[in-house]
Amino acid sequence: MITAQAQAPQPVDIHAIVSSDMMALASHMRDCQRSHGALLPVLSALEWAKAMATGHIVTTGALVGATALCLLLALR
C-alpha cells in the first residue's frame, strides 16, 4: 500500500531574496547613470530646444519673414 507523506515546507530566506533584488536594482541604476555620462545636461538642453522650436517653427518663421520684410521696406 502506497501512502502519501506530507512534506514540511522549506523555510524561505526572505532577506536573501530582498538583498539580491536590491543589489540588482543598484547595479541597474549604476549602469543607467554610466550610460548617460557627462553629456546628459547638454543632450537634455538640446532635446528641450528642439521640442520648443518644433512646436513654434511656423510662428518663428513668419516672425522672421515679417521682420525681414519690414527691414527691407524701411531701408528703401
Image: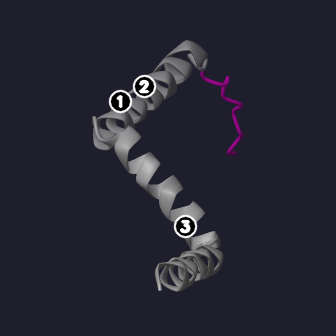
Which residue matches tag 2? 26
Image spot of residue 65 (x, y percent): 55, 83
Viewer-nearest of labels 3 and 1? Answer: 3
- At label 3, the amino acid type is Ala
* Residue 2 sits inside the magenta stretch: yes
Residue drawn 56% across the image and 72% down it: 54
Q: Is residue 20 left or right of residue 31?
A: right
Q: Which mark is residue 53?
A: 3
Distance (Cα) linking label 1 and label 2 = 6 Å
Q: Secondary structure at mark 1?
A: helix
Image spot of residue 42 (x, y percent): 36, 44
Looking at marks 3 and 1 on the same chain, the residue that comes earlier in the sequence is marked by: 1
- At label 2, the amino acid type is Ala
The N terminus appears in which quarter of the rendering? Answer: top right
- The answer to which quarter of the image holds residue 67 is bottom right
Pointers 1 and 2 in contact (C-beta within 8 Å): yes
Viewer-nearest of labels 3 and 2? Answer: 3
The magenta region covers: 1-10
Q: Which mark is residue 30?
A: 1
- The answer to which quarter of the image holds residue 31 is top left
Majority secondary structure in the magenta region: loop
Q: Secondary structure at mark 3?
A: helix
